[in-house]
Amino acid sequence: HRSPLPPPRDAGSMDAVPLIDAQTAAILGSVQKYTVQQHVKIFDNCVEQPNTYTIYNFETQQALIRVEEQSECCTRCFCAPDHSVVLQFNALDPAGNAMFPVITMEREGCCSKPCLGGFVCMDCCANEAFIHAGSVVQADGKPGGAGKLPRDRVIGRAKVPILGGGLTPTIQVMDRTPTADYEFARVQGPTLFGGCSELCCDQPFAVKRVNKDGSLSVDVGNIATITKKKPKTMMGAMREMLSDSDLYELEVHDPSVTPQQRATLIGTMLMMDYMFFERDIDMCGIDGNNRCFINICNCYCMGQVCPCQINPSKIPLPI
């Protein structure tokens, strides 16, 4: 049963091809700032577990949507974070129980795109996600199946461009029209991120409007801002060091962003989590020579994420 929801507040323009239902549009259009918390999974650093996220209204801290990953165990264990994933988004009632499907996101992984995660020199190397209205499954009814889902209910798409934006992490965000899709926004982030820097500072990614001539708006983050948040407590820092649990915020600055465009931005944010922050033992660990290392941060270059590590055992001690 779907309980009545208030109409969207400042939801802005109507979508060119409206595919999501009225209640989903109400959920997405009534919130200007979202918090996304990734759940802690037991033994996640030993055996890779499927991700779960909860999306909250930042102002009220009401849980709005639960996101569950569907993926094959073998590819998840051996190929993460570049494995194929399908994320199912379900609306939650005030008690936290799933009510109805909101959207589905799919990202094809390295089994069919073997160069994924490296330098983006052609389309087969690029991360790309499709966002569908409602629940979408394969033709045989089985769950999962990234790259095999029907595309008739696609509402948006996120894709890393050729050359990956150089030294600037870049994702093109597409909206659907009756005949094709077009780039309405572009996400750009810092060159250095992740590693131990996650403990010290927030890591913002600006969402800029793309003009009709293909140029970017001069106003940084004029559509929205996606922020990977630093932990606020020592317990939060330990959680980030020992698990894949991350905390994000998505703040929509432009009230004309439509509900389906907001859904695409949420899907883009979760694709970014797999691309940039789902790296096991990303702050410190033991290398192949059984020596400890500390990863200060990661450096982005043309789609490749390169760790910037130091080895304390090689640092000369003062005499």
Image (cartoon, helix red, strand yellow):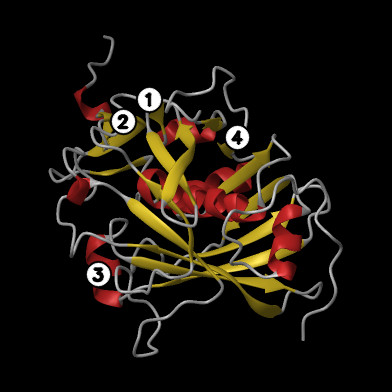
Q: Secondary structure at mark 2?
A: strand
The residues tagged by marks 1 and 4 sit, at their Cα atoms, a distance apart of 16 Å
The residue identified by callout 2 is 300
The circle drawn on residue 287 is: none
For the point 24% across and 69% down, the residue is 75
The circle drawn on residue 191 is: 1
The residues tagged by marks 2 and 4 sit, at their Cα atoms, a distance apart of 19 Å
Judge whether 41 appears above or below 145 on screen.
Answer: above
Which badge, 2 or 1, comes first in the chain's sequence?
A: 1
**How many C-alpha atoms fall within 10 Å of the one at disc 2: few (<14), some, or many (≥20)?**
many
Which badge, 1 or 3, comes first in the chain's sequence?
A: 3
Front residue of 15 and 52: 15
Q: Are marks 2 and 1 in contact (CB under 8 Å)?
A: yes
The residues tagged by marks 2 and 1 sit, at their Cα atoms, a distance apart of 5 Å
Q: Nearer the viewer, mark 4 or mark 3?
A: 4
| Tag 2: amino acid | Tyr
Q: Are marks 1 and 3 in contact (CB under 8 Å)?
A: no
The residue identified by callout 3 is 75
**The image quarter in which residue 163 lies:** top left
Front residue of 80 and 111: 111
The circle drawn on residue 225 is: 4
Q: Are marks 4 and 3 in contact (CB under 8 Å)?
A: no
| Tag 4: amino acid | Thr
